[in-house]
Amino acid sequence: MSWGLLPQALMQMIEVKEWHNMSRLKKRFTGEVKAEISYSLKPPNAVQALADLARYQHFVVEWQAFEAKFATHDIHVLWETKSFQHLKNQHMPVRLIIKTIPALASLLGKEQLLQDWQHKIVTFMSNSLYEPYRDAIKNIMLQNIDRIDALSLEDIRLLSLVIPQLKKGLGNGLYLRGLPLADVGTKFVEQHSFIIEALLRVFHPGAFSMQGSLLGWLGCVPHPKDWLVVKPLCEDTQAAMGGLPLMRLTSH
């Protein structure tokens, strides 16, 4: 068994297991999994330490340097005193404890990314209409932090504008592109329907249980899948079609 996990190797492991594991990170954000992270440093036993004293000393020195650089109230290296044959009262690093997500972000150099996420959430909730739903909205956005990350600040602004406009039956008898919206293009709704639906569930609990989807709740007509493309072969036919070189028709 390999022993003596060094800081650089552990940081790489934590980044993969904790930061890039979006499912786990979301659960830490929402409190489903506790925020505190704890990793064993795989300290050596007596036989291992005595068999390679240089490696053992390097292991201790590396964690002393790490602690001097990074240790805070929320980033803590746990040390234990051990006595081996010929090695008495050894002060040995045994575990790294990271208590908060901001501390994790700081350790991995992700502070700016975390601040960007927080800024997007605050920007969305700057609309006073959302104040009574603040906690629920924040929870939904954290559950979908990968989608929030992909949105620009302008997208966040549009998202904040469109949610209050969407009502049950708003698109009754219309295609989604025909929704009567102000200041927001319907293509935006189409492109971001997942996060829009997730947020609408906060304001309209149970609203999607019968209709099953955003499209059904709005009452929009589904886009036909079997479009027929007509290409006129003579000038007279093309003129009759308004000069269009191609016309797409639904079979409905």
Image: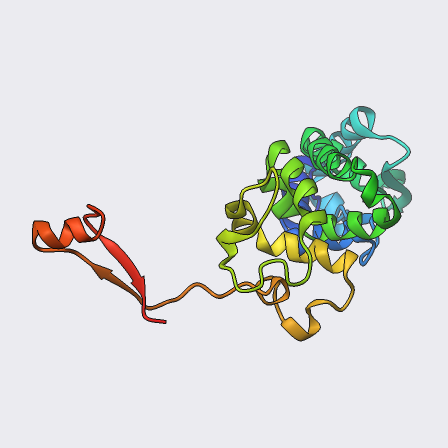
Residue with the most extreme bottom position: 210
Say how the picture is coloured. rainbow
**Quadrant placement of the N terminus:** bottom right
**Quadrant placement of the C terminus:** bottom left
Looking at the image, residue 92 lies above or below residue 209: above
Is residue 2 visible in this depiction of the protein? Answer: no
Looking at the image, residue 88 lies above or below residue 189: above
Is residue 174 visible in this depiction of the protein? Answer: yes
Please name whichever residue, 230 or 37, is drawn nearer the observer in this view of the structure: 230
The residue lying at 49 percent from left, 52 percent from top is 177
Please name whichever residue, 74 or 24, is drawn nearer the observer in this view of the structure: 24
Q: Quadrant of residue 15?
A: top right
Residue with the most extreme left position: 234
x then y, percent, for residue 104: 76, 39
Looking at the image, residue 111 lies above or below residue 19: above
x then y, percent, for residue 204: 77, 61
x then y, percent, for residue 145: 67, 47
Please name whichever residue, 87 or 117, is drawn nearer the observer in this view of the structure: 117
x then y, percent, for residue 22: 65, 51
- Residue 125 appears left or right of 78: left
Q: Quadrant of residue 72?
A: top right
The residue lying at 73 percent from left, 67 percent from top is 207
- Residue 108 appears left or right of 38: left
The residue lying at 72 percent from left, 35 percent from top is 114
- Residue 164 appears left or right of 34: left
The residue lying at 53 percent from left, 64 percent from top is 173
Please tell me how many numbered marks the rendered image carries: 0
